[in-house]
Image (cartoon, coloured by chain):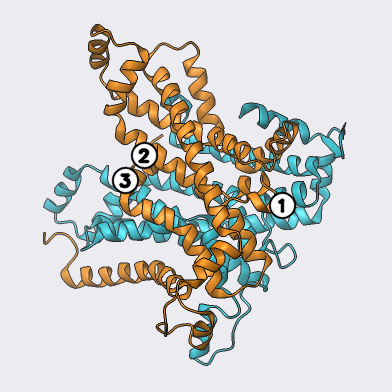
Chain colours: A orange, B cyan
Amino acid sequence: MENTLSRPVRGVVFCALLLTAISIIYPIAFIFLTASRPEMDYMKNPFGWPGEFTFDNFVTVWNGYGVGKAFLNSLVTVSIATVVMLSLAVLAAYGIAKYDVPFSRLITGTFVSVMLLPAQVLVIPLYLLLSKVNLVGELPGLGAVFVATSMPFSVFFLITTFRSVPTEVMEAAKLDGAGFLRTLVSVVLPMGTSGVATVGLLGFLAMWNELLFSFILIPDDSKRMLTAALASIGSRYEIDQTLVASGLLISASVPIILLFFASRYIMKGLTAGYSR
Amino acid sequence: MVYPACYAFYLSFTRTKGLSTRWIWFENYTRLAADPVVHQVFLNNVKFLVSVPMVIAVALVTAVLLFEKIRGWRFFRVVFFIPNVLSAAVIGLLFRTVFGYNGLVNGLLGTFGAEPVEFLTKGKWAMGIIILALVWSGFGYQTLLLLSGLTAIPTAIYEAAILDGATWWQRLWRITLPNIRQTLGFVFIINVIYTFTALFGFVFVITAGGPGYDTTTIDYLVYLRAFSGSQMGSGAALAVVLFVIVGILTLIQARVFGLNGKDAV
């Protein structure tokens, strides 16, 4: 491989990349260390290795600052919304990809164009609409908004996935007496598992991290989602650094764990958005 | 989704007081056009565009280097991607902690004997910090996009170039970069769109638009007007303006790069 970069150059490049990686890992590690030491210990020497480790900060923010409740709110709402979104998106995409649905072009076109609507445009009318049906401040209302906003990309992505399932296989299933749903569940879904997993993961992450809707549509502190709770902790109180750090870690843990276990699916989905 | 969008459009021509809604034609828009705060905020958005070339530069360098299959490139790719899966709330709070008066950076400056800097309460610094947060959190995804552009270049071209004795730099300038022109253009446009629509989280958490309106962006002003100041109509009008900007950018993208809805069907 003499035609690529020479060895010393590769060494330099490696170091540069390593430095960049450190700029990402170091703050996270710092937060991790900060979160797991007592406030007094942090004040003595914030940058040193902790004198003692403790789990108290996590317990304090979890119980005392509503982070625990917010975590559960987020987990339940986002999980349910993801499942609902997936089932609707799978049905819609399967129908459009494999059957002659009237106006399917129009429907797909609408999906693609609403993907471009910025959330800021939607948040005002959605707020007013939800307040008409008394769903402002209610988690199901937010969940419904999440489902609606994550549908377009999911349907769009799944259409491509299901297109690649050969029609012959479906016809074979039909000959064997399988109906619409049967074909979908036993033939098409197993063949499109990775696509469905990608869409589910991306949807979950996007909802988990969403801030605008979850902040504005849930004005009530006791029903806050995790990101919104975190944002208001950070901006409202000047609390101990160790507590802020624990809150950060609790909220970041879910996405980071997902990334390390499923980076392949997540990255695939995100680059697919580009090929459109 | 279409209905709320139309509803927002309708709202932008009204003024809401309590429960009554009054049709006021273009008054919201003419007021916005005459509002010095709006001017300042638009200018802020333009300033935030500085982040676009920065993100692309960093992403391009990392993508080209990762493409060389440097040792551990898979590991780097995942690590660079971490900030992308974190919420703007988390990243914003992280930056607030790191750049706070008693934060990590001032601590490091202190060990060199420098005075602590009030990063977040001085307008210029605060904007710099938000831009940094944007670059830090965004370049991993852009790297990924560029990488997928790079892998699409046929290897035969490279082999031919190597036979002709082209050096690595020549190949970079003559082959690699021209071939990912499209990807670069796409990345450019989506980043411009991001600076108009995706700053809310960072601004909200890091500076809350302050000091004054120094770091307020259009999307944050929509929130301020509609929900803090309860001027729904004014907020909606601003949101429509924002939508028009994004729409124009998207059309340019579709025109220039031949990407549009029809390709999808």
On screen, A222 above or below B22?
A: below
Query: What is the crowding at mark 3: few (fewer than 14 residues within 10 Å), some, or many (at least 20)?
Result: many
- Nearest the viewer among A64 and A177 is A64
| Separation of residues labelled 1 and 3 (CA atoms) | 36 Å
Chain letter for the residue marked with disc 2 in the picture: A
Residue at 52% x, 50% y is A72
Say whether residue B255 is visible: no
Q: Is residue B124 visible?
A: yes
The residue identified by callout 1 is B221
Q: Of B262 and B171, which appears nearest the observer?
A: B262
Q: Secondary structure at mark 3?
A: helix
Q: Are marks 3 and 2 in contact (CB under 8 Å)?
A: no
User: In the picture, residue A29 is in which quadrant?
Assistant: bottom left
Q: Amino acid at mark 1?
A: Leu
Query: Which tag is nearer the camera, tag 3 or tag 2?
Result: 2
> Cα distance, mark 3 to mark 2?
17 Å
> Mark 3 = which residue?
B148
Q: Determine the residue positioned at 31% across, 51% down.
A: A261
Pick the quarter of the image with the N terminus of chain B: top right
In terms of secondary structure, where does tag 2 sit? helix
Q: Residues within 10 Å of mark 1 (few under 14, many from 20)?
A: many
Q: Which residue is mark 2?
A: A198
The amino acid type found where label 3 is placed reads Ser
Left/right of residue A4 with respect to residue B86 in the rendered view: left
Please report the residue visible at 21 percent of the width from the left and 68 percent of the height from the top: A10
Q: How busy is the neighbourhood of tag 2: few (under 14 within 10 Å), some, or many (20 plus)?
A: many
The amino acid sitting under disc 2 is: Thr
- Name the mark nearer the viewer: 2 or 1: 2
* Picture coordinates of residue A23, whole percent (x, y): 40, 70
